[in-house]
């Protein structure tokens, strides 16, 4: 693409926007990136750090540039959540890493999944997480083992490049792209083209902050485009032509905002160029003064979609995009593709729930074997944005055998509403930002609710988050728990949660309702959920969702 024209060459302090001429770093993170591109750390890992070990890693690489290669130091064991904001990074971190593998679009072969499982077992103490960004994460990774892990990943076409950092993160697509007959269109090819051309490109390796992309033609909007930085949402124009509705500026964390429609129709052959142009706007006009203000959602809030479209077309594309219609609302409320879905070729996609995304490498290997055994195309597996997995291409006569084989490993195709709807972030066990433990607690919570409310018959999302950063999207859950330290009845400081209720995406999307800062202790979560859900069952109108009920509920119904 041609070099964009600039509005001015006069340096302005402002928010440190490159396009306004101000290039001098305004905080330590920006200085770190200017001193050395994050992509350069790869060679230092191979040539130096894999040989010197953890203690030989430069601090700027350790706590900064390593992220460009999908590596974060993990939390040292035994440090309570109340110490998270008190200790320095070097006091919180262990000498091991979390490693994130890119699985763009969630598309995996049985061979790839088998390698992912083997790496977890051999190098990560048999622990792995399937994330709500369709990635696979490891823990307990030693820097000495990283080169060998990279070799094994590369051998099956996988990588960790820019899985973290101020970069284009792993891109989301419907896990059933190209499979379901009712999709608007299949975004797999345009996503693959974008990833191949621009992941690892120094032109986009220094963005103001992370950059989350989704491209999907799913009628259920399963990639949750409302909360991505940039989304291409499948739509048909007035002539019946399939393309994309462009949304920009979504994101949660401590300042949640929903994406805004830019109002254009993007044809499939234009997607990569439009993505490049929008990403360039973020790079050049994004705010770099404060890390907490550096996401595209803040620029979009100030500019609005009209100005964004003007800059996109005039300065970067040098062409106009046609007006486009809004994408149709999601067809189904649940977006996880759990259960048995009929493929357009007559086979079946079998989606199943893990234990809040936590799994072992050994079990990933077993799933790869099952996919190869039951799938007619050699074993195709997909990850979802709800911490679930899907096996494709299963013939009708083999579906129930696969359902039973998965159940033997507590992988449920027909889970309870609570098992299906509960998600959790990494939490205190490994995350340096976390305040409370999440993974095991969320599993204990859904198991307890299954006992107390065995006949509960409505979809219900319960998202357990270890801190305010919303990796598990607590603001958009039916019941969202934000981890914090609270006082119990005895006045002691203990792990607990702030409660958010009735969050939802789709039509009339809304963030969860907070009730006068209502907080509960960790030990109270099952009692609280039971109380609120029984109230819902008693008072709901016919067909009323939990989110709709919360919207009209009196405060004391929800306490």
Image (cartoon, grey):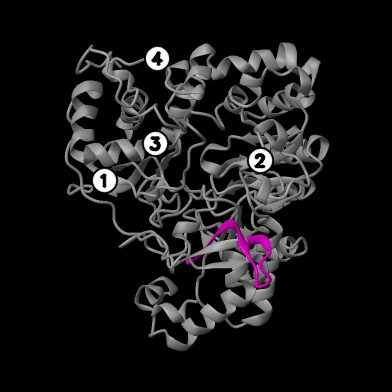
Q: Is residue 238 magenta?
A: no
The residue that appears at 65% across and 33% down in the rendered structure is 89
Question: Quick one: quadrant of the N terminus?
Answer: top left
Residue occupied by mark 4? 24
The answer to whether 211 appears left or right of 498 in the picture is left
Residue 108: x percent and y percent? Answer: 61, 41
Residue occupied by mark 2? 137
Of the numbered discs 2 and 4, the one sitting upstream in the chain is 4
Of the numbered discs 2 and 3, the one sitting upstream in the chain is 2
Q: Nearer the viewer, mark 2 or mark 4?
A: 4
Residue occupied by mark 3? 293
Mark carried by residue 261: 1
Question: Counting other residues with Cα less than 10 Å from the Cα at mark 2, is it few (<14), some (14-19), or many (20 or more)?
Answer: many
Task: Please state which of residues 527 and 495 is positioned toward the viewer in this rendering.
Answer: 495
Label 4, label 3: how far apart the Cα atoms are: 17 Å
473 versus 88 height, above or below: below
Label 1, label 3: how far apart the Cα atoms are: 21 Å
Q: Mark 1 and mark 2 in contact (Cβ < 8 Å)?
A: no
Question: Counting other residues with Cα less than 10 Å from the Cα at mark 3, is it few (<14), some (14-19), or many (20 or more)?
Answer: some
């Amino acid at each position: 693409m041609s070099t964009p024209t600039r509005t001015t060459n006069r340096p302005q302090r402002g928010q440190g926007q490159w396009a306004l001429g101000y290039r001098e770093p305004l905080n330590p993170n920006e200085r770190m990136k200017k001193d050395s591109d994050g992509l350069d750390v790869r060679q230092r890992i191979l040539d130096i750090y894999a040989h010197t070990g953890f203690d030989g890693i430069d601090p700027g690489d350790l706590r900064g540039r390593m992220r460009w290669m999908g590596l974060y130091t993990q939390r040292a064991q035994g440090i309570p959540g109340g110490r998270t904001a008190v200790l320095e990074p070097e006091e919180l971190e262990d000498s091991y890493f979390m490693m994130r593998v890119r699985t763009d679009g969630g598309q995996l072969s049985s061979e790839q999944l088998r390698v992912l499982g083997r790496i977890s077992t051999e190098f990560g103490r048999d622990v792995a997480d399937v994330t709500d960004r369709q990635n696979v994460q490891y823990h307990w990774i030693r820097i000495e083992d990283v080169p060998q892990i990279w070799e094994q990943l590369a051998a099956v076409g996988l990588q960790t490049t820019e899985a973290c950092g101020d970069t284009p993160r792993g891109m989301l697509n419907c896990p059933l792209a190209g499979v379901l007959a009712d999709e608007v269109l299949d975004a797999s090819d345009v996503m693959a083209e974008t990833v191949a051309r621009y992941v690892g490109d120094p032109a986009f390796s220094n963005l103001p902050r992370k950059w989350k992309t989704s491209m999907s033609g799913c009628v259920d909007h399963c990639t949750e485009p409302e909360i991505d930085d940039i989304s291409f949402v499948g739509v048909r124009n007035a002539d019946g032509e399939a393309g994309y509705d462009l949304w920009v500026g979504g994101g949660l964390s401590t300042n949640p905002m929903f994406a805004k429609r830019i109002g254009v129709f993007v044809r499939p052959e234009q997607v990569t160029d439009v993505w490049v142009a929008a990403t360039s706007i973020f790079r050049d006009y994004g705010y770099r003064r404060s890390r907490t203000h550096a996401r595209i959602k803040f620029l979009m809030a100030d500019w609005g979609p009209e100005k964004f479209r003007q800059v996109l077309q005039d300065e970067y594309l040098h062409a106009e995009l046609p007006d486009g219609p809004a994408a149709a609302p999601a067809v189904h409320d649940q977006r996880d593709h759990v259960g048995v879905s009929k493929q357009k070729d007559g086979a079946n996609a079998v989606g199943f729930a893990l234990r809040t995304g936590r799994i072992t490498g050994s079990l990933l290997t077993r799933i790869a074997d099952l996919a190869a055994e039951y799938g007619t195309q050699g074993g195709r597996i997909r990850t979802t944005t709800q911490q679930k997995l899907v096996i494709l291409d299963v013939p009708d006569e083999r579906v129930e055998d696969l359902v039973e084989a998965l159940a033997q490993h507590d992988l449920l195709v027909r889970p309870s509403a609570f098992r299906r709807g509960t998600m959790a972030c990494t939490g205190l066990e490994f995350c340096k930002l976390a305040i409370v433990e999440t993974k095991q607690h969320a599993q204990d919570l859904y198991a307890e609710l299954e006992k107390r409310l065995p006949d509960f018959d409505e979809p219900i999302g319960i998202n357990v988050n270890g801190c305010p950063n919303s990796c598990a999207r607590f603001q958009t859950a039916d019941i969202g728990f934000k981890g914090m330290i609270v006082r119990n009845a005895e006045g002691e400081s203990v792990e607990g949660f702030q409660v958010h209720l009735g969050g939802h995406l789709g039509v009339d999307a809304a963030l969860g309702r907070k009730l006068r800062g209502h907080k509960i202790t960790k030990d109270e979560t099952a009692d609280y959920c039971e109380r609120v859900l029984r109230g819902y069952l008693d008072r709901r109108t016919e067909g009323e969702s939990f989110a709709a009920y919360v919207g009209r509920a009196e405060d004391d119904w929800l306490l």
